[in-house]
Image (cartoon, rainbow, N blue to C red):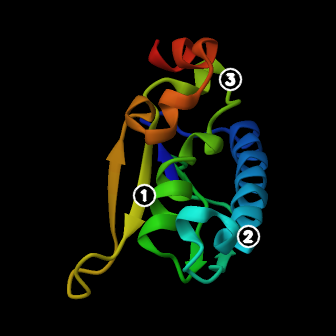
Amino acid sequence: MCLRRPVPFTLQEFDCFCAHALAFAAYASTWLQNWSRIPAHSKHPNVEYTFFPPEVSQNRLVVSLPIGGASTLSTRAALENGSSYMLWQFLPPKSMEGLEEGLTETVDPAKGPVTSWRLPSEAIGFANANPEFRQRVAR
């Protein structure tokens, strides 16, 4: 999971992203440890992700939370796709300018990992955010 924008992330903005990444990892880990207790997923075993330390690209245009482990289509949809807003939810408004979020996956092993980019307002979880939050992002 990653964020990018046309202006480099400052050290302070990367630090803020790291806080978001820790919050997301704690949230996702709790759900994953209890995945089989959710009625829609009761027939599926709990899934384990490995969260690696957040990274910033050399040109500072991309920040990422590398994730490993055994994801499923439902965990990717519910957590990585549906809760991706947790990686930028409390960034200052100025930091949101030009922001895109990306999800990386390997669809074709011959091509390797590919990142698909979208605007934060296109995220599934965006509709669940409070109105003030949606207005801030839509600017």
Secondary element under disc 2, as helix, strand or loop, is loop
Query: What kind of residue is marked 3?
Result: Pro
Which element type, helix, strand or loop, lies under badge 3? loop
Q: Position of residue 29 (x, y in %)?
A: 73, 67
Q: In the rendered structure, which amino acid carries the disc numbered 2?
A: Asn
- Asked whether residue 52 appears in the rendered view, the answer is no
* Disc nearer the start of the sequence (2/3): 2
Query: Where does label 2 land, which residue?
Result: 34
| Residue 67 place in picture, x, y as percent | 58, 71
Asked if residue 127 is positioned above or below residue 40 in the image, the reply reads above
Spatial CA distance of label 2 from label 1 is 23 Å
- Residue 100 % position (x, y): 42, 39
Q: Is residue 57 left or right of residue 33?
A: left
Tag of residue 92: 3
Counting the numbered discs, the total is 3
Residue picked out by circle 1: 103
Left or right: residue 96 versus residue 109 is: right
Q: Is residue 79 visible?
A: yes
For residue 46, what is the image quadrant?
bottom right
Q: Is 66 displayed left or right of 98 in the figure?
A: right
Q: Residue at x 56, y 14 (%)?
A: 136
Which of the two discs, 3 and 1, labels the residue nearer the N terminus? 3
Q: Nearer the viewer, residue 106 or 30?
A: 30
The residue lying at 64 percent from left, 76 percent from top is 49
Picture disc at residue 35:
none
